[in-house]
Image (cartoon, grey):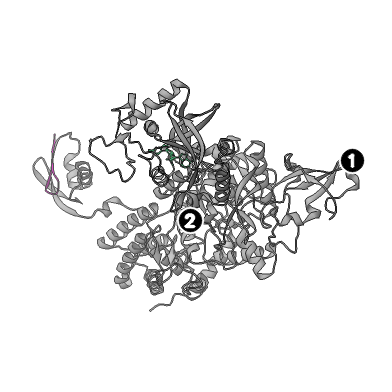
Amino acid sequence: PVHYPFAKVESKWQAYWDENETFQTPTRDLSKPKKYVLDMFPYPSGAGLHVGHPEGYTASDVMSRYWRMKGYDVLHPIGWDSFGLPAEQFAIQTGTKPASTTKKNIANFKRQLKSLGFSYDWDREIATTDRGYVQWTQWIFLQLFRKGLAEQSEVSVNWCPALGTVLANEEVINGLSERGDHPVERVPLRQWVLRITDYADRLEAGLEGLEWPAGTMTAQKQWIGKSIGCNIDFGVDQWPDETISVFTTRADTLMGVTYVTLAPEHPLVASLATDEQKDVVNAYVKTTSSRSDLDRTSAKEKTGVFTGAYAIHPISGDKVPIWIGDYVLGSYGTGAVMAVPAHDARDFEFAQKFGLDIKWVVEPASGELVSKEQAFTEAGRNVNSGAFDGLTTDEAKKAVTSKLEELNKGGPRITYKLRDWVFSRQRYWGEPIPIYFPVDFPDGIDPTTQNPADDNCEYTIRFDQPIPVAEADLPLELPEMDDFQPGDDPAGCLARAKDWRFFAKDGKWFSRETNTMPQWAGSCWYYFRFMDPKNSKEAFSKVVDEEWMPVDLYVGGAEHAVLHLLYARFWHQVLFDLGYTKHPEPFQKLVHQGMILGSDGEKMSKSRGNVVNPDDIVGEQGADALRLYEMFMGPLEAVKPWQTSQVAGVVRFQRKVYDTVSTAVANGKTKMDQETARLLHKTMKKVTQDIESMAFNTAISALMVLTNHLQSLKANVPVEAAEKLALMVSPFAPHLGEECWSMLGHEGSLAYQDWVEFDETLCVDDTVTMGVQVNGKARGEITVAKDASQDVAMAAAKDVERVQAQLDGKDIKKIIYVPGRILNIVAK
Ligand code: ANZ
């Protein structure tokens, strides 16, 4: 068999692309339509690329290469998400500094990506840790700050002592840190918080019209958790000025309320408790304070205590007991619920445990009896509800709500599950938050004689007076620190960099914010910076925004379905409101590649020893083989196990393509038989359509079928077929494609050659040959699809010379067409 010298070919073409800047797009070519193809850029971890990376990156590369050949101006950039815990942890483990390990890791990732022949515009490479990038990340933070969307707040946060940092709710799973499985505690801490909740509605509404996987849309919607309901005000017995407002989605059940439950952190808890109940209430509040929301809502057994006080029902005027229970969350709705044990499972459990009344007010519309052993939570018809009896659940919701509005005791309300985004981290390797605070000294002390960096200096930091760093002073860089390990000071390790932290200006002392931004920050806007990576005056210009946005195709893992994509959309919407972008949403189409498992069907991990290193495959079988295999394994979105034996299959395929082209070149055959022409055109059609729908595995198998057929022709491979094959193979196996193209005598790269065009008539599957009559006399034959339309049949008939001759100068009066049987044209 022929030998395909993949190593030589691949390094040759990679060098060619580099030298010729084949994939550089310095400016937008406005004569062409555009495609912005974006990959979720990698964390340059110490471990290097794993085979999951090339999967998504190959998919986006196939699309980029295909679209270039289709005449689009393609923006296809790459960079590094290089701040964050993994880089810092790696530096700590290896006793190095994050800046230098990050640099090394980036170099390694870059070498690996380059070895795979991706058609990135490397001139646009950025790292979130670059000075010129940090500057603008900080600038965006200042825009958020000025808009009132970044503020400080004492929040009960997820403090992870082992990691020495606060984690976002999203980073805590079952009370453990998502990274490293360390225990997490709830403690109050001054934090920077971004008011993403202000955008809850927009974030939900903006999903409409995006081409995203349905599961991801749902995940975002659930995370935002829009709930349409109503607020209802209960009075408090003996406290005529107080009200307890509750949020409910089931206003129809109002007449079934038998008690009210407050979250332990509800502001009225302390004042409501009667003298007899004060001690139990205080003790209960204390024990629940350390529990996370998740622990509270997922607890096996409900807990709670009676306050001794009573609420007054807004319609009946009945007195109902006020309880405290930690199944009610302080941060959702109003932090208080009207309990309807008959129709809410949590209230039912609570009422049973504490012997509280249960009042049934909804029954199935069918009138069927339901078990009283559990809550009936479905919709139905109201009973025992006075004026609301007989109404359906929906009708009753409306009737109760308008009654309350009339009484001025409530009204419609929408709530969201989404919480504000805790944005500060007490870590070293992140963007410093560009804020500082005045430092106060005890009365009568002259500040010019003081230095807060001195151990004995007494001072207070005025956290209530945050001052933004001047934009001209950005970026605010991290101080060099030898010891940047997290300590037990929740202010973070930057608090120890005293010379950096404290500074005097105009005779006054100031202290910098010592928290840094979370890793999510950099990835919130990198797609903007790629459009204008070297701009030193702005984050990106309005011109490039108009030219390139939105991202037409975004490829990356489903693990980012909620957080990264929601945070990025939030920043985007803010920048939209500020007029920096004209596009309301950043990512028009989103595709998740499925995870590649080890050959044992398990997730690849070092400890299992089932990890495949892409470097090995590239070295032994070549970059194209890895690319082809990853695209051939199965549908892009599917989770699929790695099967090394199958790599050999695509290696064989490559060799056959190479052989086919060599044979065509050697023999120079120009004639193509019908069967080959048909298969070629059908393949061109299928590969085109499959690439359009990103069904790469079936495109590759169609190419394999074509190649096998061409091989069967031995020396008679038509040159034209070989050319089309080279073009079609090139998005998947670009080195092989280029090599074949040059063997076929073409100068330069095929990257911007026209994509193949197929002839529809050659693609029809079931064809028939049928007679054509003109005025009842047979004049010729046509070959068309069995079910060809009359127009298609007529068009084919007019191509037949003898038919045409008969029709010349005449008017067609009538057409008798029986598909597959006969075409008779009556003409005079
Ligand atoms: C009375 C009621 C009767 C309720 C009934 C449900 C069924 P979603 O859909 O998740 O928004 N709720 C309100 N605030 C709460 C809080 N801070 N902590 C825990 N639970 C809270 O759920 C809204 C429902 O969750 C509300 O409607 C309230 O219980 C409860 F037959 O009110 B419902």
SS at circle 1: loop
Instruction: Report which quarter residue 725 is drawn in.
Output: bottom left
From the viewer's perspective, tell me whether residue 184 is left or right of residue 367: right
- In the rendered view, would you say 505 is above or below 495? above
Q: Residue furthest left?
A: 776
Contact (CB < 8 A) between labels 2 and 1?
no
Residue type (three-letter) at the residue carrying disc 1: Gly
The answer to whether 720 appears left or right of 810 in the picture is right
From the top left corner, tell me how far across and down residue 715 is, in percent. Answer: 32, 72
Q: Position of residue 167 (x, y in %)?
A: 59, 53
Q: Which numbered disc flags the more N-terminal residue, 2 or 1?
A: 1
Quadrant (top left, top right, bottom left, bottom right) of the N terminus = bottom left
Task: State the quadrant of the C terminus.
Answer: top left
* Part of the protein shown in magenta: 816-828
Q: Amino acid at mark 2?
A: Glu
Name the residue that disc number 1 marks. Answer: 444
> Is 556 contained in the magenta span?
no
Q: Could you tell me which residue is drawn at 35 percent across and 36 percent down?
A: 359
**Mark number displayed over residue 559:** 2
* Percent of width and height locating residue 123: 62, 55
* Location of residue 704 by image quarter: bottom left
Depth check, front residue: 516 or 734: 516
Q: Is residue 418 something that shows in the picture?
A: yes
- Tell me the mark number nearer the camera, choosing from 2 and 1: 1
